[in-house]
Image (cartoon, helix red, strand yellow):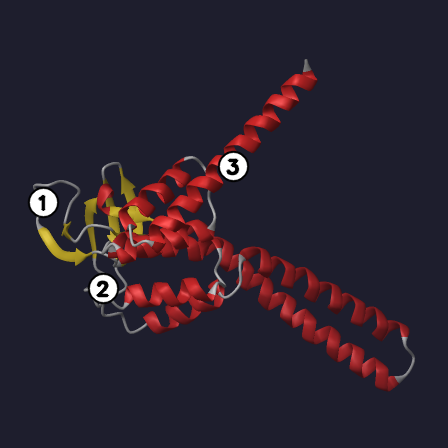
Amino acid sequence: MKKWLSVFVLFFVVTASVASNEMLLKAEKAYDEKQYKTAITLYEKLLKEGYTSYQLYFNLGNAYYKNGNLGLAIHAYEIARKLEPDDEDIKINLSLANSKTVDKIDTKENFFITAVKSNILSSLSTSAWAWLNIISLLIAAAAFFLFYTFSSVAFKRVFFGVSMLFAFIFLISYFLGRSAVKSKSENKFAIILSKEVKIMNEPNVSGTTKFRLHEGTKVRVVENNGDWMLIKLENGNEGWLKSQELGVI
């Protein structure tokens, strides 16, 4: 019985894999033939069926961009970058799409410091920070052991210096890695998907419009209140808009 069950599961997995590959090939063919809506439908179907990869989101972003859906394209690119932060093609296409957005948000004076910190934290993935932490600690420990072992003053100085250097790197990478994990868990961003949205002073349609935003603008999600979300811009402005008008990254 177990044997036949294993055969059935294997058959199902292989069949599903073949079907997904065929759908992916159809989507790529549709994109090459400039049938962008068809490509979008197929890519989204793959995502709904549970197939997730940065390449899939990248291709979906390209199809959205070609179809004129700027907000959806940026949202897809942002997810692709989240899955693969170091991919140059994603960075280039995302930068190009961002240059097409309408809203140019002025930043606070202290935002430069925040931006630098954000760039440092995002320069490595959380797992990369962890590995840097471990490796620097091991090197520092090994160098200190050699410092303790060698009797030569010259070697002692070298190994002591190396030990102190990597101990310093360990401390810096530890605190930066910890900050990166905290930032990843606390900071949630989203992309405006609609052509234009009203940002309200309270989470209901009878509220007052504070300002307007356009598709593709990146915002920070401060609070989720069911059908409404409280968002914050880089310049400090806050307001509410409907959740369906946002694509959370």
The answer to whether 90 appears left or right of 137 in the picture is left
- Circle 3 residue: 18
Give the CA distance from mark 3 to mark 1.
51 Å
Mark 3 or mark 1: name the one nearer the start of the chain.
3
Mark 2 or mark 1: name the one nearer the start of the chain.
2
User: Which class describes the residues within 10 Å of circle 2: few (<14), some (14-19), or many (20+)?
Assistant: some
Q: Residue at x 23, y 37 (%)?
A: 227
Describe the element under mark 1 as helix, strand or loop.
loop
Describe the element under mark 3 as helix, strand or loop.
helix
Q: Amino acid at mark 3?
A: Val
Q: Amino acid at mark 2?
A: Thr
Q: Nearer the viewer, mark 3 or mark 1?
A: 3
- Circle 1 residue: 207
Do we see residue 219 in this rendering? no
In the drawing, what numbered circle is on residue 101? Answer: 2
Residue 107: x and y in percent read: 26, 69
Name of the residue lying farthest toward the right: 151
Name of the residue lying farthest toward the top: 1
CB under 8 Å between discs 3 and 1 = no
User: Which class describes the residues within 10 Å of circle 3: few (<14), some (14-19), or many (20+)?
Assistant: few
Describe the element under mark 2 as helix, strand or loop.
loop
Does residue 48 sit above or below 125 in this rendering? above
Q: Nearer the viewer, mark 2 or mark 1?
A: 2
Residue 52: x and y in percent read: 46, 44
Q: Residue at x 38, y 69 (%)?
A: 115
